[in-house]
Image (cartoon, rainbow, N blue to C red):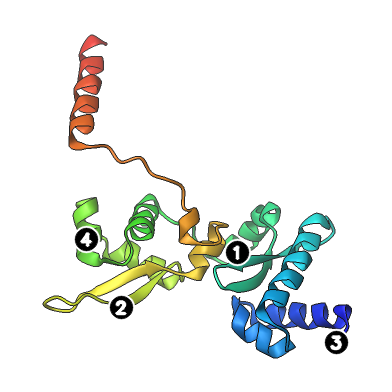
Amino acid sequence: MDQQKLEAIIEGVLFAIGDAVSMEKLSEVVEIPKEELIKVVCDMAKRYEEDKSKGVRIIRLEDSFQLCTKTELYEYVRLFIERKGRNSLSNAALEVLSIVAYNQPVTRSTIEFIRGVNSDGSLAKLVELGLVDEVGRLDAPGRPVLFGTTEEFLRCFSISSLENLPEIELLSSEESEENEIENNDEIIDT
């Protein structure tokens, strides 16, 4: 198969599916080895990124590829979506999302323990938006649902895998107490 036809098939499949397509399935469809497919798609992705007249790009999500809108067009897409009535995430939903992202798989009770408040509404909104989903059940009494992030989460935050999440700096209880004392001293001094 010639290169142009191969790339046209890959582009057509990625466009038609709309979601991430596994490298294995794409490799089977175009009948080339996975390693060769990766090289072809990565070359296509580079050209898409460099071509300023293109509004789409190809991203890699762990073991899959997806055709999606370029990040510099985010504002235009956001405006279009907002006009359709979709709301942005509340601070509470963002907080729940970050807890799930950094602690997954995680139960609802763990999320609520970390936040200190009921998180049913925020969690339901994240599931509705496809950013969080049920990933299993904990082997414990009651078999509580375990939640994790989805590929949609990776797309929305422009990261290719959970390993690319920004590092978070955790304070030990001693550091936390020291910061609290320093903050209290500043309040007293003012």
How far is disc 2 from disc 4 in space, using C-alphas?
Answer: 15 Å
Q: Residues within 10 Å of mark 2 (few under 14, many from 20)?
A: some
How far is disc 1 from disc 4 in space, using C-alphas?
Answer: 32 Å
Where residue 55 sits, quadrant-wise, is bottom right
Q: Which residue is pictured at 62% across the width and 78% down the height?
A: 23
Give the residue at mark 3. 1
Amino acid of disc 3 = Met
Where residue 100 sits, quadrant-wise, is bottom left
- Of the two numbered discs 4 and 3 on the same chain, state the one appearing first in sequence: 3
Q: Residues within 10 Å of mark 3 (few under 14, many from 20)?
A: few
How far is disc 4 from disc 3 in space, using C-alphas?
Answer: 53 Å
Give the residue at mark 1. 81
Give the residue at mark 2. 136
- Of the two numbered discs 2 and 1 on the same chain, state the one appearing first in sequence: 1
Disc 2 and disc 4 in contact, CB within 8 angstroms: no
Secondary structure found at label 1: helix
Q: Which residue is pictured at 58% across the width and 61% down the height?
A: 82
Percent position of residue 4, x then y: 88, 78
Which dot, 2 or 4, sits closer to the camera?
Answer: 2
Q: Residues within 10 Å of mark 1 (few under 14, many from 20)?
A: few
Percent position of residue 67, x then y: 68, 71
Q: Residues within 10 Å of mark 4 (few under 14, many from 20)?
A: some
Which dot, 1 or 4, sits closer to the camera?
Answer: 4
Residue sitting nearer the eye, 115 or 40: 40
Amino acid of disc 2 = Gly
The quarter in which the N terminus is drawn is bottom right
Percent position of residue 38, x then y: 69, 72
Q: Is residue 2 above or below residue 100?
A: below
Image mark count: 4
Give the residue at mark 4. 110
- Of the two numbered discs 1 and 4 on the same chain, state the one appearing first in sequence: 1
